[in-house]
Amino acid sequence: MQEGISLQKTEKNLGKNVGRAIAKYRQSAKLTQAEVAEILNISIDAVSRMERGIIMPSVARLIELAEIFDCEAADLLTASSPRLQDQSQYLFQLLNQLDEQERCQLIHIIESMINWHKKE
């Protein structure tokens, strides 16, 4: 019984994480929920429910969203994953957008934050 509850919680968290990633990529693409809904031929409420994690999009829908946002479908999952390996890949993609000096500055900020958290 406990495993079933744990699995439901994991699925709920995954839905919310994927929803946040969808919202983030939509906003980065400078699209409204209404525009995405129109492209997908679904209701605005359906887009809203995906972004809030109330409904989990199918694999086919994730592929459609990735095409709209000009990213890989895996990006929508990786950006929202709690797994360290996926988070590392996502950070790599973000860092890859910066020049060397910007990356060094960001790494310094991250190191400072980690040191600050260790002191707490």
Image (tube, rainbow, N blue to C red):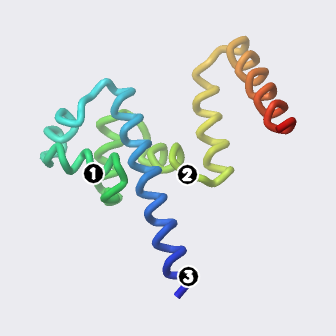
In the picture, which quadrant includes the C terminus? top right
Q: Residue at x 84, y 31 (%)?
A: 115
Tell me whether the residue at label 1 lies in contact with that at label 3, contact meaning CB atoms closer than 8 angstroms: no
Query: Quick one: label 3, few (<14), some, or many (20+) residues within 10 Å?
Result: few
Name which of mark 2 and mark 1 comes first in the sequence: 1
Q: Are marks 2 and 3 in contact (CB under 8 Å)?
A: no
Please report whichever mark, 2 or 3, sits nearer to the chain's N-terminal start: 3
Q: Residue pushed farthest bottom?
A: 1
User: Which percent across, then down, holds residue 62?
Assistant: 34, 51
Mark 3: amino acid: Glu
Q: Is residue 80 left or right of residue 107?
A: left
Question: Residue 81 — which label?
Answer: 2
**The residue tagged with tag 3: helix, strand or loop?**
helix
Q: Which mark is residue 49?
A: 1
Instruction: Locate residue 78 relative to residue 113 in the image: left or right.
Output: left
Residue drawn at x 41%, y 35% is 24
Secondary structure type for disc 1:
helix
Identify which residue, 97 or 113, lies in the foreground.
113
What residue is shown at x 39% (from left), y 27% (from top)?
A: 28
- Residue type of the residue flagged with mark 2: Ser
* Quadrant in which residue 113 is drawn: top right
Label 2, secondary structure: give it.
loop
Instruction: Say which of 68 and 27 sits in front.
Output: 27
Amino acid residing under circle 1: Arg
Q: Which residue is mark 3?
A: 3
Dot in front, 2 or 3: 3
